[in-house]
């Protein structure tokens, strides 16, 4: 079974609380999303492989550490996942970025794919899938399936807020993928929105309705 990791650092909780507030502007919301993503990125990248290297300081030769192993590919789910890219890119400026376009049909709540562009081969890459909201789990589940169809064999999934229903659905469909959440919320409402949640993440990020 995949791991569920709740990254409940006090700064993450504080910033997610600000994101929830109705009177937080789009500008503030975007900034907070970047900050939370950066803080979560610190936990998500904890498992990256490293190797020892020799370096020369102005004082003497010593042994340091550098990141080695699989190259990282960030994959935001459009649109709202875009709000998490800057935070992760600040930690890993060399990471490539693929995009998956999915929107949730408001009637059926099922995800509809409209775009997919990956930076070449995904096999042997460390793929970090980004979406702020895990509600029914349909979007994240389909996105992970799409990545696997394109060869991805090492995936981590990162969401700012998740509902128990979405966590269960995702873990059932992808028991091999570790899931990182900033907060596990209470439940979904009848329209598939997370409670207490923060509303529609895409609309709040981009000032749409
Ligand atoms: C939101 C969110 C997730 C999805 C979560 O996207 O960013 O992708 O809903 O819901 P689910 O777990 O029930 O699939 P939305 O469809 O609103 O598209 P947007 O990002 O373009 O606003
Ligand atoms: N998508 C969102 O943006 N928010 C929710 O609460 C559910 C799905």
Image (spheres, rainbow, N blue to C red):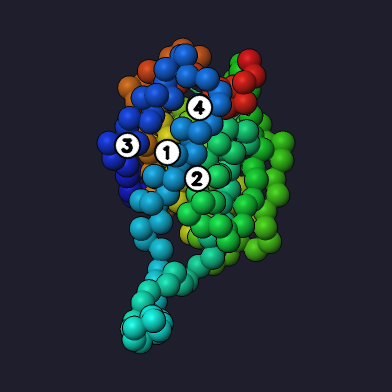
89 left or right of 197? right
Q: Which mark is residue 87?
A: 2
Residue 174 in sight in this render = no
Could you tell me if the residues under marks 2 and 1 are in contact, i.e. CB atoms within 8 Å?
A: yes
Residue matched to label 1: 36
Could you tell me if the residues under marks 4 and 1 are in contact, i.e. CB atoms within 8 Å?
A: no
153 left or right of 207? left
Could you tell me if the residues under marks 4 and 2 are in contact, i.e. CB atoms within 8 Å?
A: no
Residue matched to label 3: 11
Secondary structure of the residue carrying tag 2 is helix
Assign the C terminus to one quadrant of the image.
top right
First in sequence, mark 4 or 3: give its number. Answer: 3
Residue 37 percent across, percent down from the top left: 45, 42
Residue 48 percent across, percent down from the top left: 41, 63
Q: Which mark is residue 26?
A: none
Question: Foreground: 4 or 73?
Answer: 73
Residue matched to label 4: 29
Cα–Cα gap, marks 4 and 3: 15 Å
Disc 3 crowd, CA 10 A, few/some/many (<14, 14-19, 20+): few
Is 1 above or below relative to 56? above
Secondary structure of the residue carrying tag 3 is helix
Is 130 above or below relative to 47? above
First in sequence, mark 4 or 1: give its number. Answer: 4
Residue 209 in sight in this render = yes
Could you tell me if the residues under marks 4 and 3 are in contact, i.e. CB atoms within 8 Å?
A: no
């Amino acid at each position: 079974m995949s791991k569920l990791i709740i990254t409940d650092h006090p700064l993450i909780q504080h910033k997610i609380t600000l994101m929830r507030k109705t009177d937080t502007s789009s500008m503030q919301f975007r900034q907070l999303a970047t900050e939370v993503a950066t803080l979560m990125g610190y936990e998500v990248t904890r498992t990256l492989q490293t190797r020892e290297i020799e370096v020369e300081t102005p004082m003497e030769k010593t042994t340091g550490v550098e990141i080695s192993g699989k190259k990282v590919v960030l994959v935001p789910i459009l649109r709202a996942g875009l709000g998490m890219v800057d935070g992760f890119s600040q930690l890993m400026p060399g990471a490539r970025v693929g995009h998956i376009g999915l929107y949730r049909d408001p009637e059926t709540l099922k995800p509809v794919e409209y775009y997919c562009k990956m930076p070449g081969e995904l096999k042997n890459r460390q793929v970090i899938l980004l979406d702020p909201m895990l509600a029914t789990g349909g979007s994240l589940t389909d996105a992970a399936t799409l990545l696997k169809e394109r060869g991805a064999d090492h995936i981590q999934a990162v969401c700012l807020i998740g509902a128990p229903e979405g966590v269960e659905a995702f873990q059932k469909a992808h028991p091999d993928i570790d899931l990182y959440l900033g907060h596990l919320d209470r439940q979904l409402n009848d329209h598939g929105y997370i409670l207490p949640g923060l509303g529609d993440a895409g609309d709040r990020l981009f000032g749409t309705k």
